[in-house]
Image: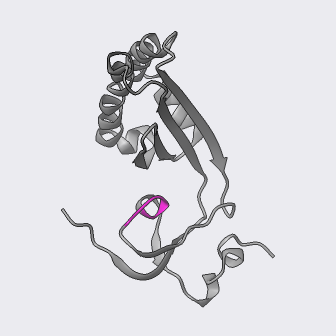
Amino acid sequence: MAQQVFPGRFTTENTEDIVVFIIGMRFNNRLAVNRWFPVFSAMPGMIKELYTHKEELGFLSMESYFGLRTTTMIQYWRSTDDLLAYARNDKHLTAWKKFNQNARNNDAVGIYHETFQVQPGQYESVYVNMPFYGLGKTLEHQPIGSAKSSARQRLKTQ
C-alpha cells in the first residue's frame, strides 16, 4: 500500500517533551541462525503490544531499519516514565526474560539500546516530499513557513 507523500517542506512542532529510544541487535555470526533467531523473534510480540495499546502506554511511534549485520528500531515515547513503566509491565518482563536467556552468553548476537530525553525546543525535523515519518508521525506535521525556514528558527535558538 502506497503512503501519501506530502509535497514540499514540512516540520513538526517542538513544544512537547519526547523520549527517543533506540534499540537493536547485531548479527555477530549470521550463520548461527539457531542462536540469533530466538533473540530476533522476541521483538514482534512486543511491537504488536505497543501499537495495540499506544495511548495507555505512552508509545508514540517507531521506525525500523534492517541492515546486513545490524537492525535498529527508533521509538518515540511520551515520557521516560511511560517507557520505564512499559519495561516493568508483566507482558514485557516475560518477553524480556526470555530474550535475555537467549541473548546472554550468546556471542552470535549482540543487543543494544540508548535512551534520550528531549525537552521542548531542543529538537527539530524536516521532511521534504515525504509521507508521515519519524516525529512527523507522532507530532503535529506542518508546512515550513518563513518563521521556521531555518534549523535555528525551528530550534528556537537566538
Rendered location of residue 128, percent (x, y): 46, 77
The structure residue drawn at horizontal position 54% and vertical position 41%, both measured from the top left corner, is 22
Which one is in front, 69 or 142?
69
Above or below, 25 against 155 in this view is above
Q: Quadrant of the C terminus?
A: bottom right
Taking the magenta stretch, the answer to whether it contains residue 135 is yes
Horizontal arrangement in the rendering, residue 125 relative to residue 136 (left or right): right
Q: Residue furthest left?
A: 1
Q: Is residue 152 left or right of residue 81?
A: right
Q: Is residue 66 above or below residue 142?
A: above
Vertical arrangement, residue 156 with respect to residue 30, above or below: below
Q: Nearer the viewer, residue 107 or 127?
A: 107
Residue 36 lies, in percent from the top left, at 39, 21
- Region of the chain picked out in magenta, as a range: 132-136
Q: Nearer the viewer, residue 72 or 149?
A: 72
Quadrant housing residue 94: top left
